Image (cartoon, rainbow, N blue to C red):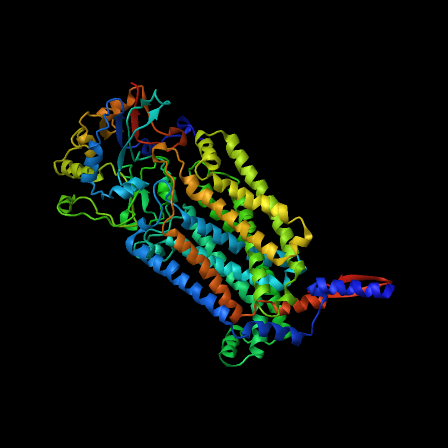
Amino acid sequence: MIRPEEIKMSAEETGKWGMVIDQDICSGCQACVAACAMENNISFVGEEDAGYGRSMHWIRIERFWEGQYPEVKMTPNQPMLCQQCGHATCEPVCPAFATVHSQAEQLNLQVYNRCVGTRYCANNCPYQVRSFNWRDYERPEPLSNQLNPDVTVRRRGVMEKCTFCIQRIHKAQDKAKSEGREVADGEFTTACAQACPANAITFGRIDNPESLVSQLAKRGHGVKHLEELGTLPNVTYFKGG
Amino acid sequence: MADKKQHSHEEHLREQHLMLDPLPRGKMNDMVMEAMTEPPTWKYWLIFAILSVIVAYGLFFSWGKMIAEGLGIAGVNRPSYWGVFLVNTVFWIGISHAGTFISAILRVFKAEFRRPFTRAAELMTTFGLVQAGFSIFMHMGRVWLSYWLMPYPNQRLLWPNLHSPLTWDLLAITTYLLSSTMYLFLPLIPDVAMARDRSTGWRKNVYKILSLGFRGTEGEWTHLRNAMNIFAFAIIPVMFSVHTIVSWDFAAATRPGWSSTIFGPYFIVGALHSGMGAAAVVLAFIRGTMKNMKYFVRGEHFDAIGLLMLIISMTWAYFFFNDYMVQWYGGDKWTQQLLHFHEAGPMGWMWFGMLFCNVVVPWAILWNRAWRSNPWIIASVGIIINVGMWFERYIIVPISLSINRMPFTWRLYQPGIEIPLGIGTMAFFILLYMAASKLIPLIPVWEVQEGQMAHELKKFGRETVVSVSELE
């Protein structure tokens, strides 16, 4: 097992975009889940499929209980989404190069129209955050009018996952470029962070030490999930701070 | 008195061993031709029709429905993204293994008992790989784009990802399919030529093409022997590589229970285990249902296969224990959870069933030579071993996938349309065999004749001994 400190970090592996999630103030209201579904044209799979483990959410709130009845204690809610790993396990296993690393944005991309649906990436993701389009799901009126024109609508047989709202990143970058400046910290954020009423989610550039997300991530009690696997995740969690 | 005893000893030897019981060439050729060209009985057609219906519904209709509606009608879910499709793929590749194993390894080591059943075993390789191909393509979300996995030149310069074990797998299986088909074809040439000389009508035309003008001259035999020798040696490493690479689909992944360095040999032995079992079943059916086959396939062959099955079962048990031990000793908390889930979870019955079918049954039955020589006992053990090996793959794929490092997603898998699809591949396998039994000589006659020429009963004083001369 590789320890994170043993990995020689290149500039690329430190990541570019990052997120900090404060589990202590997350109320588990699922606003981020709903906002993400709206922003990213995620299908609604219906009760039956969702109950069978086919729900399609790019972010989910995990709840756990500790202890034996009657001393049952709920642990802090744990929003789980793609960790945008620097060393992603999903990337090398795709036979068709449908899941690739973006050199420019340091994100894991899913190329929907290249995906042939072997689902190997989803098996190999230790965070289990990938969703598969098991069917062509219906979008009855008026839901069909709600689609975000900036995001591709996926068909059956295709894998998908959180993109850190890459369409928003590109929009902000284009705007800044046309105005001849850099993207300012906090100028835009992801749909989940925007929707969070408790401000538990912070998004920004972690390669910029001045940004809010970098400042937060440097605070002592941040943890990264399954760090021991050497995946170099770009999401930091606060719990019990 | 002594002479009579001597005589009965010789009789006994002839009765036991095909190699010591020669028949005139013409007679033997006629026997094989008769078994092949005999008009099928109504029973044959009935089974053929039933299997065709199963294949039409289970394989083609169900698959078409799944392509049209998506994998939602199958049972795959999160976290079991791979289900029975992958189980069946590994299962069929395993079956296809023994064909080449029996044929190539026993040919290389000059094991004489192989002679009458190399063809039946090689057919198992090709037909099994067809089913494995069906199973793996069914599994894909967008199968109509599967040509993207092939390295073909294209304008966008997009190539398959050679980092992915699935790409290795595809290349390995394609290589194996092509080489095993050629390896099946080479020893078939003299038999097809024999059939060409003894048939009329459409059969004659087909065999004329298939025999490539083989007339049995010394030069042709030399070429054929050289080619078969090269193939027999070359296909052995290919065979080992294929199932090792299949195991890498799992072993190269970052998952508890899968990332195990012993998976390569463990999968090879598992494949041989199920494949030998399947070979025994096929042989018992050939002997039981086809004409004149009781002469060619005898107790000694089942005895030899039974011994191999027993040895392979013991090897499998060793690798299973090794894999389990090392994973448990590793002490990873997720692996601990998984191992506990295997034996004590809701599918624990399958784990114990696997050990019962793969270890207990073969060990309890195959030690006995009399039982080993009985075709139906060996065939039953073969079926039980295959059930056990299917369980083993089921435990490795969907059951192990149920447990991962995100306990929130833990969930059991229930197969859906995988069931008719799986039964469809099984029916198609049997159907192909039934068709083959009427189209090509299932017994390699020339190989049997060659063996019988090499064997001789010699008398040294009063003792009758078997002598084998080197032909090649």
- Percent position (x, y) of residue B63? 35, 57
Q: On the picture, is B312 further left or further right than B337?
A: right
| Picture layout, residue B65 above or below residue A24 | below
- Percent position (x, y) of residue B444? 60, 67
Residue B468, visible in the rendered structure: no
- Percent position (x, y) of residue A71? 34, 20
Foreground residue among A121 and B222: A121
Residue A212, visible in the rendered structure: yes
Of the 4 image quadrants, the one containing the N terminus of chain B is bottom right
Q: Residue furthest bottom?
A: B201
Residue drawn 52% across the image and 64% down it = B182
Of the 4 image quadrants, the one containing the C terminus of chain B is bottom right
- Percent position (x, y) of residue B208? 52, 77
Q: On the picture, is B257 further left or further right than B161?
A: right
| Picture layout, residue B187 above or below residue A239 | below
Q: Tell me how many marks there are.
A: 0
Indicate the quadrant where residue A170 lies: top left
Foreground residue among B105 and B117: B117
Foreground residue among A129 and A180: A129
